[in-house]
Every structure is written in C-alpha cells, then in structure tokens.
C-alpha cells in the first residue's frame, strides 16, 4: 500500500484550492466540473501530484493520501444518499475529491446509480441495513469488483472518509492472493463466467424482457498479464456463463474461498482518501451497527477511469455519464 501524509502546510494549500473552486462554481455540479477537474488538479501540492502520477504509472494497487482538509462545520451524516442530495451536504468535500481524483484518472458516473451523480455518498440508510449495496451496515459487504458487469467499469474506486467513529474497516483482497493450482487458474482465465449488474444500479434488467433478465456480460475472472494479472469478480453477482459448467463452477468457488481467506482491512480516518485499483483488488466492508444520529460512517465515492475515450465510445457521445 502506498501512502502519502500531507503536512499541515500542504493540507492548507489544498483547502485554499477547494475554497477557490467553490467561489467559482456557484452552482456546484460535479458532472460539469469533471471536464476541468484535471486542469485544477495541477494546482495541488507538487508532492501529491508526483504521488498520484507514481501510483498511476507503477500500477500501485492501493494508495492512501491522508491529512486532507475537512470542513470545520461538517454537517451531520445524512440518512442515505438521497438525503445528502437534498441537503447538499459535504459540498467542499466533493470539490476536494473531484480535484484529487482527477490527479490520478478521469471521474465518471452511471446514469442509473445514485441519480447519475458523480460523487456518491456512502452512508448507512434506514431500511437498507441488510441490502447488498454500500447503504448497508449490519451485513458484511461482500468482496467485489466495482460495477463488475460492465466493460467500462472504473480503473479505480476512490473513497474519501468524512467520518468513521466506529473504525469500520474497508476490506480488500489483492489478486495475488488467489492461490489455486494451475489447472484451476487456467479455467479462471477463460470466458466461462457471467458478471451481473449489482443492486446499486436501478435499471439492472434488460429492456423489454418480460422475465426481467438482469444485465450481464461474460468474461474471465483472471485476465491480463500473467506476471501481474487483473481480476474481475463479485461474490454476490458472479455465476458460470453456461449452466451446468461444473468445472467453471468449481474453479469459481475455489477463487471465492481463496479470496475469503486472504482478506485485509484498512480503517479510514476522517481526511483519508483511498484509491483502490479496481483491476487488482476487490473490496468490501466489515459490518457495523448504524447509529442514525448524524455521526455515522460517511464516505464520498468517485469512480475513476484511466481513458475517458472508453466512455465516449460506449456512450457514443462526449459524455462521462454511462447509461
Ligand atoms: Fe464498492
């Protein structure tokens, strides 16, 4: 894990940059701001720019920047992302996240996830305690590749911690932890697996299909360079591509077991921004008891892709919002 702790002077520099952007962006809209975020990120402290560049070039799997500034008057943790939208809670933190994220890669969003917003709120939501989304709390959020179903899934998931009073762990497993025999690995390398859209996407069903077939794509679980492979899996939303393919099913279960046996955890503190390489690690979250008193764990989340043209080709428009 690569880490960079800003000194207090650097932290104040970042804070001043955020204030400047807030003054310029009267109607804060991350989707509009995304096109100029990379340019603004050139004004981040030089150590941070170098760090983010090094993370990208070296393909570091996990990176954390700490001692980033937070608003002194940070509002209470909203009870779910819809409430955050209504109140505009954490706007300065969204600006900061967009600038820092754009120092690494290109921010983008999904039209059917949190209303197409580019900066998501990750906080426990009443009624969602046992859901399979980041609004859950009482259940372990299973290890997953973010947006596993889609060829344009992010290269990075970035999480900016605003509150985490109960030291809830963000869990992760590195692709190198998959410890299986060569013949099993060979199966994992084949296009024998189906990846389904997860429950955070509201339009997960294929249009016009009366059986409400969930959107999915087929591919390998392990792929890319053999020395430093990439990984694609979601323990809740992956199956074999062809029903009855027992060999693929057994290989997938071996991969699940191997991942579950190698879980590591990082506890984010307020002011920490973590970048998880969505091709090299899967991530999840430990369970916790929600408070719903305004002091719950609260993260902002931004998806980042290395090449924005992949989005333009997919959407057939110069749009960072994927349908
Ligand atoms: Fe996630």
Image (cartoon, rainbow, N blue to C red):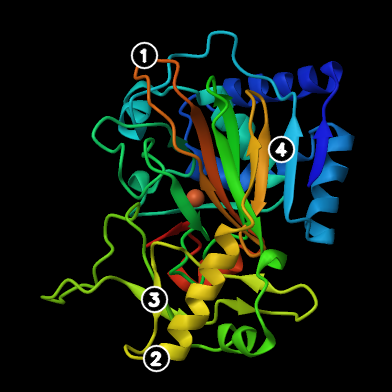
Asked whether 289 or 3 is in front, the reply is 289
The disc at residue 239 is 3
Q: Is residue 175 visible?
A: yes
Image location of residue 294, percent across then percent down: 40, 15
Image location of residue 167, percent across then percent down: 57, 26
Q: What residue do we see at 71% from left, 37% from top?
A: 40
Sequence-first tag of 3 and 4: 4
Q: Is residue 31 left or right of residue 107?
A: left
Asked whether 160 or 118 is in front, the reply is 160
Sequence-first tag of 1 and 2: 2
Query: For the residue carrying disc 2, how many other residues have a C-alpha within 10 Å: few (<14), some (14-19), or many (20+)?
Result: few
Sequence-first tag of 4 and 2: 4
Q: What residue do we see at 59% from left, 15% from top?
A: 71
Please name the residue that numbered disc 1 is placed on: 293
Please name the residue that numbered disc 4 is placed on: 40
Please name the residue that numbered disc 2 is placed on: 245
Q: What residue do we see at 46% from left, 14% from top?
A: 75
Q: CA distance from mark 3 to mark 4?
A: 42 Å
Sequence-first tag of 3 and 2: 3
Q: Is residue 238 left or right of residue 301?
A: left
Q: Is disc 1 in contact with disc 3, using a CB cutoff of under 8 Å?
A: no
């Amino acid at each position: 894990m690569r880490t960079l702790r800003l000194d207090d002077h650097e932290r104040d520099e970042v804070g001043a940059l955020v204030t400047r952007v807030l003054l310029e962006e009267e109607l804060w809209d991350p989707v509009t701001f995304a096109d100029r975020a990379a340019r603004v990120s050139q004004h981040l402290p030089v150590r941070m720019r170098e760090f983010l560049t090094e993370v990208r070039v070296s393909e570091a799997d996990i990176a954390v920047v700490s001692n980033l500034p937070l608003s002194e008057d940070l509002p209470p943790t909203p009870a779910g992302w819809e409430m955050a939208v209504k109140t505009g809670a954490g706007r300065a933190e969204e600006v900061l996240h967009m600038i820092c994220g754009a120092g690494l890669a290109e921010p983008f969003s999904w039209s059917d996830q949190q209303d197409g917003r580019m900066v998501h709120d990750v906080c426990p939501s009443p009624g969602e305690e046992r859901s399979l989304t980041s609004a859950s709390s009482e259940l372990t959020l299973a290890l997953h590749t973010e947006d596993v179903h889609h060829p344009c899934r992010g290269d990075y998931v970035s999480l900016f911690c605003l509150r985490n009073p109960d030291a809830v762990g963000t869990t992760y497993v590195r692709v190198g932890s998959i410890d299986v025999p060569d013949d099993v690995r060979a199966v994992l390398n084949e296009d024998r697996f189906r990846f389904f859209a997860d429950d955070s996407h509201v339009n997960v069903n294929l249009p016009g299909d009366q059986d409400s077939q969930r959107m999915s794509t087929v591919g390998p679980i392990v792929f890319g360079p053999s020395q430093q492979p990439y990984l694609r899996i979601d323990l809740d939303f992956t199956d074999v591509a062809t029903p009855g393919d027992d060999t693929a099913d057994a290989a997938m279960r071996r991969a699940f077991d191997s991942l579950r046996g190698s879980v590591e955890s990082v506890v984010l503190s307020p002011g920490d921004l973590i970048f998880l390489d969505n091709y090299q690690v899967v991530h999840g979250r430990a369970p916790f008891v929600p408070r719903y008193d305004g002091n719950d764990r609260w993260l902002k989340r931004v998806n980042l892709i290395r090449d924005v043209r992949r989005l333009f080709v997919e959407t057939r428009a110069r749009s960072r919002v994927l349908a």
